[in-house]
Image (cartoon, helix red, strand yellow):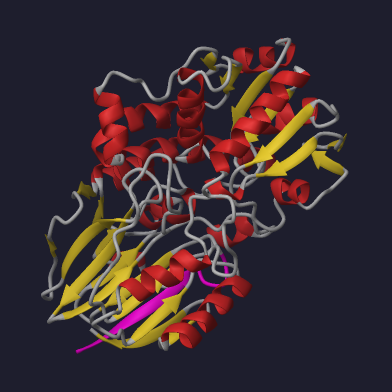
Amino acid sequence: MSSTLGFYGGVGSVTGANFMLDTGKLAVLVDCGLVQGDKNADEINARPFVYDPSKVDVLFVTHAHADHIGRIPKLVRDGFRGTIYSTEPTKELTRIMFGDSLHIMEREAEQEGRKPLYSEKDIDLALSLWKTAGYHETIKLEDDVTVEFTDVGHILGSAMVQFTRHGKKIVFTGDIGNVPQPLLSPPEVPEKYDYLVMESVYGDRVHEEVEERTAILKQHIESTIAREGTLIIPAFSLERTQGILYEINNMVEAGKIPPIKTFLDSPLAIKVTDIYRDFPEYLKSEIQEQIKAGDDIFSFEGLSFTETVKESSQIARTHGAKIIIAGAGMSHGGRIRRHEKKFLGDTNTTLLLVGYQTVGSLGRLLQDGAKQVWIDGMQVAVKAQVETIRGYSGHADRNQLIDLVYGGTQEYQPKQVFVAMGEERASLFLTQRLRDYLGINAIAPEENAEVEIDF
């Protein structure tokens, strides 16, 4: 039977994931995210959807990052009244991510004299439409479609979405987790699928430091202690922060490093960390055992959670060696920018990047070696060391992506693999590798492409 697969976001770009599966009787979306990092992002996100949101029956959410959930309240504002499905942690994380995004959006809209993308009323309505399901729980939809979430190991509660109908299967990977992750299990490899829509953030690169990442982090902490300097880590509030806290917790408790003043300076990250505590069953088994043995894996001597602006402003007056973990991960907003303005001019500072830095972001400029940057209207000289640990990436690298496809095609050759959710260069590189190495019919679709599939 013929269905249509629509690529309405997340193609030619890492962000803005938005895909539609339309059987003719059932219109299903997978993710509805914000475009981020683009200089025209606000304008792009405010545009009407290509499709009519009121005609969409169901929305499945792979995980709670803004580039996968950020336009859901707009979708509701524009007429969507269907059911939203995700895992339970994804719903709870989304709840706080929505609130945080709205706060920022309203402030920016007021400054720029425009209306915000959505309102609190739209958030409330979206959450009222939401249902949750666990991994491997069967969800039955109309037109003989069944759906199942499987663990993709990217962030807490993240999932691939697998649709089955009349013996045919299509899998949407969402973002695929790096292996190994500090806190999460490896991605489950999808099997016997006919179509795959996959991410390609690192489709042209290999993470060379996965095994060494903890040792490298330890070296940077030891160096900071020896210099009585400052280690600044712009960390994504969701997953990266919790992984770094866990690593430092283990080093301190094992006596591998002395306790060091560490500030988690992000109200959002603090709330997210509480949700991680609420869902230990979604962490990998060895972490669950550590927690059962009595270890609070997100707490260690020297750690402070600075929720208020006043507490945050006092960090700069703290003498001696210290670690500051703050959002945003690409330095495009949040409290990290205040610390960068204060400390980037100090040769005893190390700025440690532990995640992907999109083109055009302040983080990418720093990573590329800029010696002068503008932060909130202020020119800042960069005298600090700027270092990157790529092994903490939450995304699978090129080889892991190829292995995931290979692992699911041993006995069942897919009809087509669609490579999306990556910069154009990365998507095209991975597409060619899948063709050359695995003989897979792989393509990198264009934005708003609509492809007929046998489903």
Residue at 82 percent of width and 49 percent of height: 369
Is 438 inside the magenta-drawn segment?
no
Q: Position of residue 337 (x, y in %)?
A: 71, 33
Is residue 66 depicted above or below 252 in this figure? below
Using the rendered view, name the quadrant where residue 42 is placed: bottom right
Question: How many circles with numbers are drawn on the protein?
Answer: 0
Give percent across and percent down for residue 288.
Answer: 27, 33
Residue 66 showing in the rendered view: yes
Q: Is residue 49 visible?
A: no
Depth order, front residue of 335/25: 335
**Above or below — where is 179 with respect to 449?**
above
- The span picked out in magenta is 1-13
Residue 454 location (% of width, % of height) = 25, 88
Q: Is residue 178 above or below residue 201?
A: above
In depth, the one of 55 and 372 nearer the eye is 372
Does residue 375 appear left or right of residue 284 in this picture? right
Horizontal side of 200 relative to 223 (left or right) equals: left
Name the main secondary structure of what is drawn in magenta: strand
Tell me residue 214's x, y (percent). Answer: 54, 38
The quarter in which the C terminus is drawn is: bottom left
- Residue 12 within the segment the image draws in magenta: yes
Quarter of the figure that contains the N terminus: bottom left
23 vs 238: above or below: below
